[in-house]
Amino acid sequence: MYLDSDKRRPSLTPQLALRVAMVGGVALMAFALIFFRLWYLQVLSGDKYEAEANENQVRKIKVRAPRGEIVDREGRVLVDNRVGLAIKVSPKGLPRDESRRRALYERLAKLLGVKPARLQQDVKSQLKAVPFSTATVKADAARPAVQYVLENQDDFPGVTVERVFLRSYPHRNVGAHLFGTVGEISENQLKDQRYRGVTLGDRVGKSGIEYQYDRFLRGRNGATRVQVDALGTLRRGLGVIEPQQGRQLRLSVDLDVQRAGQKALGGAKGAFVAMNVRNGEVLGLGSSPSFDPNLFSKVVRKRDLDRVYSKDNGEPILNRAIQGGYPTGSTFKLITATAALEGGLITPDTVQYDGGSLKVGNVVFKNAGNAVHGAVALRKALSVSSDVFFYRLGQEANGSGSGLLIQDWARRLGLGRRTGIDLPAEAPGLIPTPKYRNEGFSSFRRCVAREDPTPAQISLGKCGFLDRPWSVGDNVNLSVGQGDLQADPLQVAVAYAAIANGGKIVRPRLGQRIEDAGGRPLQELEAPTARKLKVRETYRQAILEGLRSAASEPGGTSTPVFEGFKIPVAGKTGTAEKGAGRADQSWYVALAPYPSPKYVVAVTFEAGGFGAETAAPAARTILAELFGVSGAGPVPRGTAPD
């Protein structure tokens, strides 16, 4: 018996019908989404993706921009660019055959004096990083090598010669620390916001003015646009976007003053500063020994780095004008005098007897050269540089009633803190205090207990050199610029400028304005408002009169140096003893013209002996250039000790 077919078909239950409806709905929605997505891509976004596809065929090869020039206050070029000839390898012209390519690298390596394997690896790494560019094998090739390549082009397929811009420092070691150096940007610098828009391989300022004003000096790179096919093969050039040179920077520096200062240092370890006392404009700032910043304008060689960083070679890279932490000797007496007057320890006419020495506890402090000056007040004490007069002030200022009188005024006048000059890596220096020495001594004792060093290791400073707590003798030493004091010529110049200008703590400035390539002003670089320091006019005049006497009257420590000099000078010598058989630090600070000084000149030599022997004659040379007068005249050595 056969069953009817309709009766054999299973019935569609309500649950099954619901499931079929749900599956159908999902399928319909999926097809709808796909349809609308295709419609969106084809109709609404078609033009956008077509443009991106076309753009994907275009590659940009960077053309580096030349940096802006740096000029002095008169517009004379201090730093510029020169055109170099770079030997490069183009991937398009290289032989496809491996053996022929290897032979090419061998010929090129022999011509340039490098190893073939190293040259080949360098080319590969460059082309891997930027596949459509050219690889530089010699950034600044010698003309004979360039001519040989051009004359034998058949032997050097794919090798081209291109013009490149290289930083040039025409005055070589003159102003090297001031202008600074350039180099390829590092990965750490790329993370810094100040280098926004800079890419790996670009050259940026690394030190000095080049670093400080990099955002102005750095130009805008151009590009060569080329078209490639889907396989990455170069098809044709699409034009060049010309690079834009960086802005020109005008400095307050006077090239002639800078040259005179560098020459006055004579290659010995030392530094100088020449500054306008009224507005802080720096006309010259130099350090010695110096170096040639052109070494850093191309590929930096290890032997060059070793030479400029070597302490055995005098550490030429160190900018002693803003990083040299030195005891200042008697040039510090201006600070001690100001503190004692304002602190009520003396008046300008207070007389003290200088018998040649002062005993403090079990220590006897003596005048330089065992000199005896008799009854002296402030003006004469500055003129003849009476140590005993200032020893007593240091002893009195250490009392509980005076607190840290000398230290406080030293900081107010700009020592122990950065001046704020527009140069990087300025050191703050050090004004010693009881806290500084007592904490250092505690650390020393803990180190000795922990490390148990030998006496020889202790003498070499294994646990530091603060091997005793503060005593009144430390304040006595500070009063004449000795002991733990650390200052540099720029800080001392700022302190002297404040007394000369009526109490303004100027902020030294080098940058004057930003200009276009034609020298037209675009932006003035204004210095921040100077701090104002209250110093009573009678006190200020008494100090200046003492400094004038020191450079002009019989018995003055620098009178013989400035004999016959056409410009009236007020100044102070300084000789800082270093001990341990080391030569004394020589200092001189000059203010001119007296009685209304416009300039301050501070000079120091690390091993110059008496201030009147070395630093003062150097200051005279710089002053002569500043005022355009003859620097000739008697410059005796070993005349007046200080």
Image (spheres, rainbow, N blue to C red):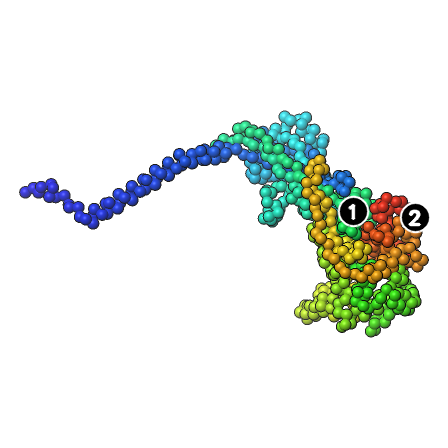
Q: Amino acid at mark 2?
A: Gly
Residue at position x 70%, y 52% in the image: 528
In the picture of the structure, the residue carrying the numbered disc 2 is 633
Crowd around label 2: few <14 · some 14–19 · many ≥20 (10 Å): few
Question: Residue 506 location, x and y as percent?
Answer: 75, 53
Residue at position x 20%, y 47% in the image: 16
**Residue occupying the far front of the picture:** 537
Q: Looking at the picture, does residue 190 appear above or below residue 38? A: below
Crowd around label 1: few <14 · some 14–19 · many ≥20 (10 Å): many
Mark 2 lies on a secondary structure that is loop
Q: Looking at the picture, does residue 364 appear above or below residue 610? A: below
Q: CA distance from mark 1 to mark 2?
A: 24 Å
> Between residues 218 and 282, which one lies in front from this camera angle?
282
**Residue occupying the far left of the picture:** 1
Nearer the viewer's eye, disc 1 or disc 2? 1
In the picture of the structure, the residue carrying the numbered disc 1 is 283
Question: Residue 385 location, x and y as percent?
Answer: 87, 61
Mark 1 lies on a secondary structure that is strand
- Tell me which numbered mark, 1 or 2, is placed earlier along the sequence: 1
Q: Amino acid at mark 1?
A: Leu
- The quadrant holding residue 386 is bottom right
Counting the numbered discs, the total is 2
> Between residues 94 and 523, which one lies in front from this camera angle?
523
The reply, left or right, for residue 381 in relation to residue 288 is: right
Which quarter of the rendered picture does the N terminus lie within?
top left
Question: Residue 27 location, x and y as percent?
Answer: 29, 42
